[in-house]
Amino acid sequence: LRKYTSVKGRVVPINKKFVIYILRKRNLTTEEALERISKKLNIDKDDIGFAGLKDKFAITYQYIAFKKIRESSLLRLKDKQLHLEKVGYTDKTLRPGNLLGNKFTITLHGAKLTKIFKELEVFPNYFGPQRFGKNNKNSKIGKLIIKRKFAKALDEINKMYNTKYNELIKVRKQKLKFFVHAYQSFLFNDLLSNGRK
């Protein structure tokens, strides 16, 4: 993270509007981790910036951004499931779309190296079931939004989260985009599967 930025061709110091931390989590979704952090610090979850969602069943690392936070209070947020490490400051918070990419390390336990793995050069990269939620609810809600069946989508969202939103516009934009992306992923898997037949 830079200490300086460029404004109209001039190099100026970053004014430290936001503090950036690396969030390490284990067996938590990004949403669950942010919920725990917001409750511990007594802040609105929407005030925590992040650039993407990470898997629950993995050890994941991602940047998150806080605005005007007492950094000493973050020391209470270190346990086996969640750990924060300060890395610097920035002028802008983090938003979905800020990611340049992801890096994964996949470890197989008890796997045997077979002939098919030795010969395999490429393989279809399907989206996993976690993206679609229980009973594919995430992708179904995304389809309803795309089909402009907003009342039905809102009803399903309220059932899923035990909320009482009366308009779809009241639901967080990031959450609505997540449902749409889940439906896009469902279509991708379907096309990939059909292409292999």
Image (cartoon, helix red, strand yellow):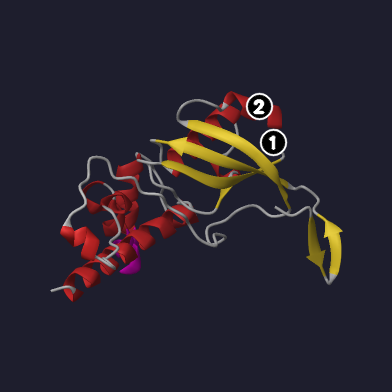
- Horizontal side of residue 150 vs 65, given as left or right: left
Residue for point 28% across, 68% down: 121
Asked if marks 1 and 2 touch (Cβ < 8 Å), the reply is yes
Residue for point 28% across, 49% down: 133
Residue 149 appears in view: no
Residue for point 58% across, 39% down: 44
Residue for point 38% across, 41% down: 58
Q: What SS does tag 1 mark? A: loop
Amino acid type, residue under disc 1 in the picture: Ile
Residue 170 % position (x, y): 47, 52
Residue 162 % position (x, y): 34, 39
The range drawn in magenta is 142-150
Question: Could you say which is closer to the camera, residue 186 or residue 116?
Answer: 116
Establish if 58 lies above or below 39: below
What residue did someone put label 2 on?
Answer: 73
Residue 111 % position (x, y): 22, 45
Mark 1 Cα-neighbour bin, 10 Å: few <14, some 14–19, many ≥20: few
- Horizontal side of residue 80 vs 78, given as left or right: left
Question: Could you say which is closer to the camera, residue 135 or residue 115?
Answer: 115
Amino acid type, residue under disc 2 in the picture: Ser
Question: Could you say which is closer to the camera, residue 87 or residue 187?
Answer: 87
Residue 125 appears in view: yes
What residue did someone put label 1 on?
Answer: 69
Which secondary structure is most common in the magenta stretch?
helix
**Picture quadrant of residue 176:** bottom left
- Horizontal side of residue 155 vs 43, given as left or right: left
- Horizontal side of residue 143 vs 82, given as left or right: left
Give the total number of marks visible in the rendering.
2
